[in-house]
Image (spheres, helix red, strand yellow):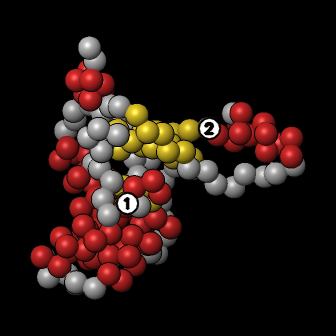
Amino acid sequence: MVSIGFEKHDHAVCVSDALSAAEQYCAAHKLQLTKVRHRVLEILLGQHRAMGAYEILDQLSAEGMGSQPPVAYRALDFLVSNGFAHKVEKLNAYIACSYPGEVHSPAFMICRACGAVVEAQSRVATGTLGDAAEALGFQIEKTVVEAEGLCPVCKSEDAP
């Protein structure tokens, strides 16, 4: 899947392709993509932004799919542990993965003005952090980079 970045795209195709990829992955790995898990992924994909667990739970509840926090958290845990979503720690929120099925280190670009979040791929282990870890004899197993700034739209609005 190609990252959409901050640009416009065919949203229906984007969501459809990602859901199809998740369904195929789960079938191939004998994982259960339950109705609630599927719906949570669909909600995340439909928004293209980071969402809090309670915001997702509100939507599930409105659709009659459960109103207790464990409903959303279990689905999110499944999606994160299987690479379909990521947790954005700075926002205490979740976002659909832009690169499902690919081994990668996510880097999140978070717009401080509008709240948009875009996932990019990073290669931290081969950069400065990787060099520092190697010098210390440390093996990096997982990284997440979160950068805060201005998206192209907010940057242009903020320009003098």
Disc 1: CA contacts within 10 A as few (<14), some (14-19) or many (>=20)? some
Q: Kindly identify which residue carries mark 2.
A: 123
Q: Secondary structure beneath disc 1?
A: strand
Q: Up-down: is 2 above or below 22?
A: above
Disc 2: CA contacts within 10 A as few (<14), some (14-19) or many (>=20)? some
Q: Up-down: is 154 above or below 108?
A: above
Left or right, 144 with reference to 131: left
Q: Secondary structure beneath disc 2?
A: loop
At 17% across and 79% down in the image, what residue appears?
61
Task: Tell me the kind of residue under disc 1.
Answer: Ala
How far from the left and from the top, in percent, is residue 14?
Answer: 26, 46
At 29% across and 50% down in the image, what residue appears?
49
Q: Up-down: is 158 above or below 88?
A: above
Q: Up-down: is 62 above or below 159?
A: below
Left or right, 70 with reference to 122: left
Name the quarter where the C terminus is drawn: top left
Tell me the distance, in whole angstroms, between the alpha carbons under discs 1 and 2: 23 Å
How far from the left and from the top, in percent, is residue 106?
Answer: 51, 46
Is residue 4 at all visible to an observer of this figure? no
| 113 or 134, nearer to the observer | 113
Task: Tell me the kind of residue under disc 2.
Answer: Arg
| 103 or 48, nearer to the observer | 48
Q: Kindly identify which residue carries mark 1.
A: 93
Left or right, 16 with reference to 76: left
**On the image, which quarter does residue 25 sit in?**
bottom left
Marked residue nearer the N-terminal end (1 or 2): 1
How far from the left and from the top, in percent, is residue 66?
Answer: 22, 84
